[in-house]
Image (tube, rainbow, N blue to C red):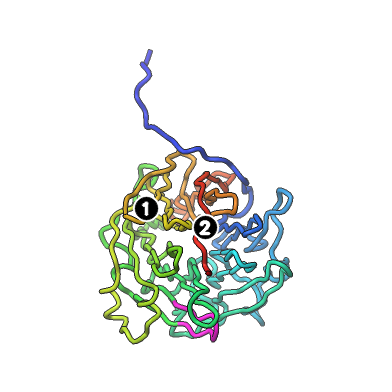
Amino acid sequence: MMPMLPSEHYFGKLELVFSFYGAMPTGVSVSESGRFFICFPRWGDDVTFTVAEIVGGKLKPYPNIETNAVNPWDVAMSFVSVQSVFADGRGTLWVLDTAAPNLTEPIKGGAKLVAVDLKTNTIRKVYTFTEDVVLPTTYLNDVRFDFRVGKAGFAYITDSSSKGPGAIIVLDLYNGNAFRRLNGAFSTSPDPYFLPKVEGKILMNRNKDGSTSPFRFACDGIATSPDGKTIFFCPLSSRQLYSISAESIRDRTIPDTALSDHVKYWGEKGASDGMMSDAQGNVYAGDYENNSVRKIFPNGRMETIAHDPRILWPDTFSIGPDRYLYFIVNQLHRQANYHYGIDLRQKPYSLLRLKIDELPAPMSG
C-alpha cells in the first residue's frame, strides 16, 4: 500500500458567494449598500447581457436588457463588451466598456466609461474617447477614481493591449478630457522575459492550426492609496508591482518620456489580474500562477492570505461594506485559445469571498 505522502499546504477561509453556469464573468463590484454587480465581456460565450446585478440569487441585466443590447446606431449608449464594473461608494456604478468583442479593434465611438446612478438605475453620463487616446490596439481593462482632485475628480484607466502599447489613461471627469500616460513604458508593458506557468503548464496562445505565440498583455491591475496620492499598477504578463504619484501622472507639463522617472518599483508580487486597496493602504492582488491571494502592506511587506486549489485564475477584486474581499474565479487560462481550440473550462465559475476586516480605500474626503 502506498504510504500517505506529504502534500502542499492550502490555507485561507474561502466562502462561495455565487456560482455562474452561463457565460464567463471577469468583473465584480460591491456597492456601499451591499449590491453585487458582475460583468461578462463578449469573448465568445453566449452573452445575453454584459452587465448584471445579482438579485434574489439570480442574475438580472443591469440597468436593463435594452442597454445590454448592442445598438449599432448608438454604440455610445449601449454596452458592447464590458470588462470592468466599479461601484465608487458614492452612489454610482462605473461601467468600463471595451467595445472590443473577442479582443478585436474597438468599435469606433464605442469604447467608453459610463456612470450609472444606483438610486435611479439610469445612465447619468457617458465619457467617450478620441482616437489618440483609445487606439486601434487599445483594450480598456480596469478603472479607479479620485474625486478629491479637479472640479469633478479624475479616473485612471488601464490599457492592457496585447498588440500595441500599454498605458494608463487619465480622464478629467469635469470636462471629459483624456490623455495617455506611460504609453509603451517598461512598467506598463508585458515583461519580455515573463513565462507564465499555470496548473503546472506554460500558458501561451495555442491556435487551432497548431501555431503558438506568447501570452502578452500590458497594464491591467490598478489600485489607489486611501489618500488618492499613489496609483499602483501592474501588467498582466508580469510578476512585478509598480506605483506612481497621481499628481505626476496628471501633470502634463511632465513629458511622457520623462514620466518613467517617477515610477516606483515594489518588487515581485506574483502574476496578477485585478488589484484592490483597503482603507489602511494595503493592496490585494491575485497570483494566478499559484492559486493565491496576496496582501501588500504599505511598507512593502507581502503576505499570502489565501492559497487554495479552487482559486483558478483570480480576476477582479472588490471590498464590500461587510469587510470581505470578494473576487471572481473564472479559469481564464483554460479558454480554448490557449489549448488549440479546446475549451477546458469547467462550470461553474465562482464568486468567492475572504474576510479581511478592512473597508475599501475611500475615493473622496
Mark 1 belongs to which amino acid?
Answer: Phe
Q: Residues within 10 Å of mark 1 (few under 14, many from 20)?
A: some
Residue 297, labelled with which disc? 1
Q: Is residue 208 visible?
A: no
Q: Is residue 122 left or right of residue 275?
A: right
Q: What kind of element bears circle 2? A: loop
| Residue at the (43%, 53%) spot, across then down | 284
Q: Which residue is mark 2?
A: 360
Q: Residue at image x 52%, y 57%?
A: 360
The residue depicted at 64 percent of the width and 56 percent of the height is 36
Residue found at x 44% / y 79%: 135
Q: Looking at the picture, how far across and down is residue 234, in whole percent?
A: 37, 62
Q: Earlier in the sequence, mark 2 or mark 1?
A: 1
Q: Nearest the camera: 272 or 295? A: 295
Q: Label 2 to label 1, Cα distance in Å?
A: 14 Å
Farthest-out residue, front: 365
The amino acid type, in three-letter code, at marker 2 is Pro
Q: Residues within 10 Å of mark 2 (few under 14, many from 20)?
A: many
Where does the image place residue 113, in percent across and percent down from the top left?
56, 74
Reply above or below: 172 against 199: below
Q: Which residues are magenta?
A: 170-178
Asked if residue 50 lies in the magenta stretch, the reply is no
